[in-house]
């Protein structure tokens, strides 16, 4: 039995809304208004809310990624600063008093702090890589 189109839907639009609808119609390659509306109804991604959910999730993930990258940049700057401080003290200690226990204890503490920051940086990089990998798998490209 053929599907009979016996139901009529009418919509009034403002001039701006009509321009937007015409743009959508063009994107869908619809021949007419009815064809465009039928395509919109049959496209589950546009009609069941998943598109908005996907956009919200993408925006949240971008915000999370942005925060992680800011943290990476801070940690990177912190590590560089710490290494410069240690190098300066090592040069001064080697010239002034190579037997100064307090200086070498300070150097050890700084190296431990650098190692901690480096581990945090490595962990953040791994998290960003994992997030990017997940995003590629979700969107159909499992190759990282």
Image (tube, rainbow, N blue to C red):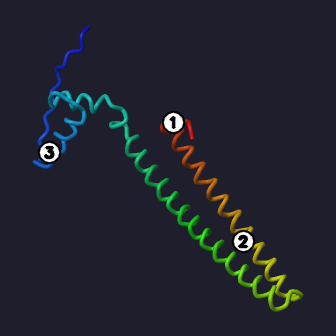
Viewport quadrant of the N terminus: top left
Local crowd size for mark 3, using a 10 Å CA cut-off: few (<14), some (14–19), many (≥20): few
Residue located at (33% from left, 31% from top)? 43
Q: Residue furthest front?
A: 95
Viewport quadrant of the C terminus: top right
Q: CA distance from mark 1 to mark 3?
A: 35 Å
Eyeballing the image, is 4 above or below 62?
above
Eyeballing the image, is 113 above or below 136?
below
| Circle 2 residue | 114
In this rendered view, identify the residue nearer to me: 119 or 100. 100
Residue located at (14% from left, 49% from top)? 16
Residue located at (16% from left, 20% from top)? 6
Q: Is residue 69 left or right of residue 32?
A: right
Q: CA distance from mark 2 to mark 3?
A: 58 Å
Precedes in sequence: disc 1 or disc 3: 3
How many numbered marks appear? 3
| Circle 3 residue | 19
Precedes in sequence: disc 2 or disc 1: 2
| Circle 1 residue | 141
User: The residue tagged with tag 1: helix, strand or loop?
Assistant: loop
Precedes in sequence: disc 2 or disc 3: 3
Eyeballing the image, is 47 above or below 79?
above
Give coordinates of residue 67: x percent, y percent: 52, 63
Give coordinates of residue 60: x percent, y percent: 47, 55
């Amino acid at each position: 039995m053929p599907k009979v189109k016996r139901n009529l839907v009418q919509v009034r639009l403002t001039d701006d809304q009509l321009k937007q609808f015409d743009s959508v119609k063009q994107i869908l390659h619809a021949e007419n208004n009815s064809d465009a509306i039928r395509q919109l109804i049959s496209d589950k991604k546009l009609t069941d809310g998943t598109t908005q959910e996907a956009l919200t999730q993408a925006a949240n993930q971008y915000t999370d990624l942005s925060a992680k990258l800011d943290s990476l940049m801070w940690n990177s700057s912190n590590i560089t600063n710490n290494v410069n401080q240690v190098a300066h003290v090592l040069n001064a200690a080697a010239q002034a008093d190579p037997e100064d226990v307090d200086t070498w204890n300070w150097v050890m503490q700084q190296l431990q702090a650098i190692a901690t920051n480096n581990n945090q940086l490595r962990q953040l990089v791994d998290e960003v890589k994992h997030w990017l990998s997940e995003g590629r798998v979700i969107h159909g490209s499992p190759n990282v």
